[in-house]
Amino acid sequence: MPESAATQATLRSRASRALARSSTAKVSFRALLVLAVVALGVYALDQISKFLVVTNLTEGDVVRVLDDVLQLHFVRNPGAAFSLASGMTWIFSIIATGVVVFIVWFAGRIRSVAWSVVFGLLLGGVLGNLTDRLLREPGFGVGHVVDFISTPWMIPAIYNVADMSIVVSMGIFMILTIRGIGLDGVRTPAAAGKDAPAKDSSSKADSTADGLVGPAPTESAP
């Protein structure tokens, strides 16, 4: 019955969670390491790319890398990602600082490598833009973020590596949430139970088909 299959799926999920908890220390260290490596990688790539743009281009310059598909367009953005909400720089500085503090505090609860990637991408991206707001002109907390990536065929906004990292992290976040994968890397009982009725119905259909066909006839000895 579907209820029985769902119950079995729930029990398997609980057993998997218990097993995950038994190796908490090992998995937690790996998850934290992945989060740190991803965050540092994104942050380094973001800051290096901005340094190269500021060093080699003048604000307002446009370099067509692939015609209208990909352009380098150097602008200084006082607003949020993709040049949104200009004039609220200090508010975004406070929000970004809060996000960084939350991720650092919350990181110890993550047991899944996939979720570590999500929070690593988010942390690296937020830190990248926060660094600009804290250290670039016109002043501490209200600095303008360096944006330089332009893809006119896709979106009219100009963005940077940090912005892309944040967007990708949100995409992976949605996928993991829809699939019901928890911070420990195990699917929740509700998500796992959705697949059980379909599998049970398939098994019933196979059994019914076997019953209709019946056993193969055997020849009697003369």
Image: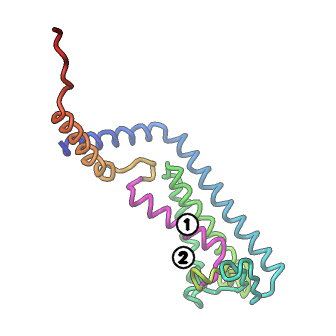
Q: In the figure, is residue 196 to the left or right of 177? A: left
Front in this rendered view, residue 19 or 156: 156
Q: Quadrant of the C terminus?
A: top left
Q: In the figure, is residue 174 to the left or right of 52? A: left
Front in this rendered view, residue 45 or 131: 45
Q: Residue at x 54, y 76 (%)?
A: 95
Q: In the figure, is residue 33 to the left or right of 214? A: right
In the picture as drawn, the residue positioned furthest to the top comes out as: 222
Q: Which residues are magenta?
A: 157-181
Q: Quadrant of the N terminus?
A: top left
In magenta segment, residue 1: no
Q: On the image, numbered disc 1 is attached to which residue? A: 168
Q: Residue at x 21, y 34 (%)?
A: 210
Q: In the figure, is residue 117 to the left or right of 147? A: left
In magenta segment, residue 178: yes
Residue 141 in percent (x, y) is at 65, 81
Spatial distance from mark 1 to mark 2, Cα to Cα?
19 Å
Asked if the residue under mark 2 is in contact with the one under mark 1, i.e. CB atoms within 8 Å, the reply is no
In the picture as drawn, the residue positioned furthest to the front comes out as: 222
